[in-house]
Amino acid sequence: MADRYSRQVLFSDIGEVGQEKIRSSRVALVGCGALGSVSAEMLTRAGVGKLRLMDRDFVEESNLQRQSLFTEEHVSKGVPKAAAAESTLRAINSEVEIEGVITDVRWDNIEGLCRDHDIIVDGTDNFETRFLINDVAVKHSLPWVYGACVGSYGISFAFESGTFACLQCLFERPPEVGTSQTCDTVGILGPVVHVIAAYQVTQVLKILTDQSPSRKILQVDVWNGTWQTLGAERAKSQQCRCCQQHEFRFLEGEETTRMTRLCGRGAVQVSPQQKGPPDFHDLSQRLDKSGQVDFNQHMMRIQIEGYEIALFADGRSIIRGTEDISEARAVYAKYIGN
């Protein structure tokens, strides 16, 4: 393994000292979709010490076009993304401690998942979770790297605690659901994912080696061939409720619900009031005559009366076939319980 990182060590801004810092680092990555899977692979190959991956979803065929850690076998077996990513990454680099966590990152678990890490990487697809990350980062003085892609366009920026603005300084609230384009409504090109992930991981490596990240917001459109950086040396907003007044409204659960529409997918995520592992065997026997049921150690898939229900081991479910929250709640109660 002595030669594994030799080319990275030869890069003068990292060197042997920087590589040791990378190898002793702990990175939390929220979301194992497009950006998350590409970033996770780069970080694993770079030799971070520990990489915790968190994701609420499972691998689907439409993911394979851009989410580089997944295969057709993961699709056919209905493997959750965090579990599939963990398995693939361990095969890439056995030196890195890889932990895949199958969960919906929420206000009531994000601190326990992220606060003991050196940096947080954004691989999410929604602003509510990004505002949660921002709350945790500010509260625990952690750096984090934002990234987003849609169509052929991508954007990224590194946030550090200190004199510079946090996410809430720049955007007081997340945009309303349905007002922003998503990859499920306008599509996405694989190349822009790799460009933005590469920029994110570069910023992570700079921070882990005690170097200042870029103070520029990167904006890229790979189809139109445009590349723009915008200055972001803006000081904190004195009115910011997060970094100035230390009101962590997202982290305190004031800005979230137990039901989440998955935009563009015709699906709703339902989180149970009582958390705990469902009995897949018992549920399979109960529903077997009513619909098509299959399950593995991580999740159960149920096709019944026009709905597709993905039930996870924590009791959380993604119900496809409706975007109506009340209808999804009724489907969950009917077939899974309360």
Image (cartoon, helix red, strand yellow):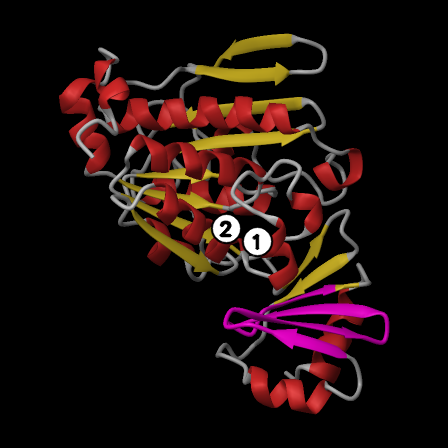
Image height of 155 relative to 337, above or below: above
Marks 1,2: beta carbons within 8 A: yes
Q: Main secondary structure of the magenta part?
A: strand
Image height of 12 relative to 80, above or below: above
**Mark before the other along the chain sequence, 1 or 2:** 2
Closest to the observer: 258 or 288? 288
Q: Quadrant of residue 268?
A: bottom right
Q: Magenta stretch: give its range.
A: 292-319
Is any part of residue 246 visible from this angle?
no
- Disc 1 marks a residue whose amino acid type is Glu
Residue at the image position 66 percent from the left and 90 percent from the top: 285
Expressed as whole percent of the image width and height from the top left, the position of residue 10 reads: 22, 14
Mark 1: which secondary structure? Answer: loop
Residue 255 circle label = 1
Residue at the image position 49 percent from the left and 54 percent from the top: 84
Expressed as whole percent of the image width and height from the top left, the position of residue 327 reads: 80, 70
Closest to the observer: 294 or 132? 294
Q: Quadrant of residue 243?
A: top left
Q: What is the crowding at mark 2: few (fewer than 14 residues within 10 Å), some, or many (at least 20)?
A: many
Residue at the image position 19 percent from the left and 23 percent from the top: 18
Mark 2: which secondary structure? Answer: loop
Question: Quick check: is 303 in the magenta stretch?
Answer: yes
Image height of 207 relative to 69, above or below: above
Q: Residue furthest left?
A: 17
- Disc 2 marks a residue whose amino acid type is Phe
Residue 250 circle label = 2
